[in-house]
Amino acid sequence: KIFRAFDTGGPSGDYGVNETLNRIYISETGTNWKFEVLAFESESGFDKLSIMEVDSEDVETTLLDEHSGTSLPSPAVYTATQSKLKFYWISDSSNQDLGFDIVLWEDNAGTNTLQEVDDVYTLVIPSSGSSSSSAHYLVELEIDTH
């Protein structure tokens, strides 16, 4: 699975006022997630994104902690060890901006890789056969605005 996650403004619009969003991504196959923050612009100190991985007992471990401002987090690529990710976004009532653009994919312990060409993302999954070739799957990107 591969997803492209945006704030409520989508890929090119500003996010809304006084938002509180919780998004949960669960791998149906039980593999871990990897994600890359492609773009980030928010009111520094007030509009924030946190990303946590969640284990089978619903214990959260923070991967990205209350990121805000106009720069990408460092690092911009994260690898979770769990099959469940939680995105938590808040904004206040002033200074809306472009927000976040994140691509996330099932990493499968590092065996799956992501390739990007002209803003089109392809998930490369190693073949299950004995040859060393890879199967390339272009997966339609899903946008969750709830």
Image (tube, rainbow, N blue to C red):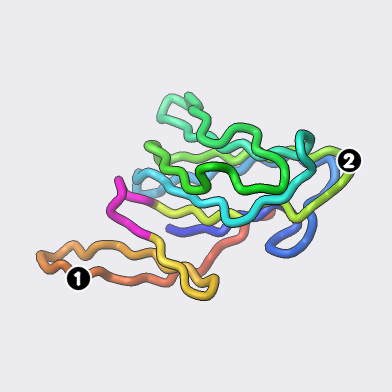
Outermost residue, bottom side: 118
Disc 2 secondary structure class: loop
Q: Quadrant of the N terminus?
A: bottom left
Residue under numbered circle 1: 133
Q: Amino acid at mark 2?
A: Ser
Disc 1 secondary structure class: loop
Q: Amino acid at mark 1?
A: Ser
Which tag, 2 or 1, sits closer to the chain's start? 2
Quote the CA–CA distance across marks 2 and 1: 51 Å
Residue at 46% of width from left, 59% of height from top?
A: 2
- Viewed as shown, does residue 117 lie left or right of 81? right
Residue 124 can be seen, yes or no: yes
Which stretch is magenta?
107-113
Residue at 83% of width from left, 40% of height from top?
A: 18
Which mark is drawn over residue 71? none
Residue 15 % position (x, y): 78, 52
- Viewed as shown, does residue 133 lie left or right of 120? left
Residue 83 % position (x, y): 40, 41
Residue 101 % position (x, y): 62, 56
Residue under numbered circle 2: 93
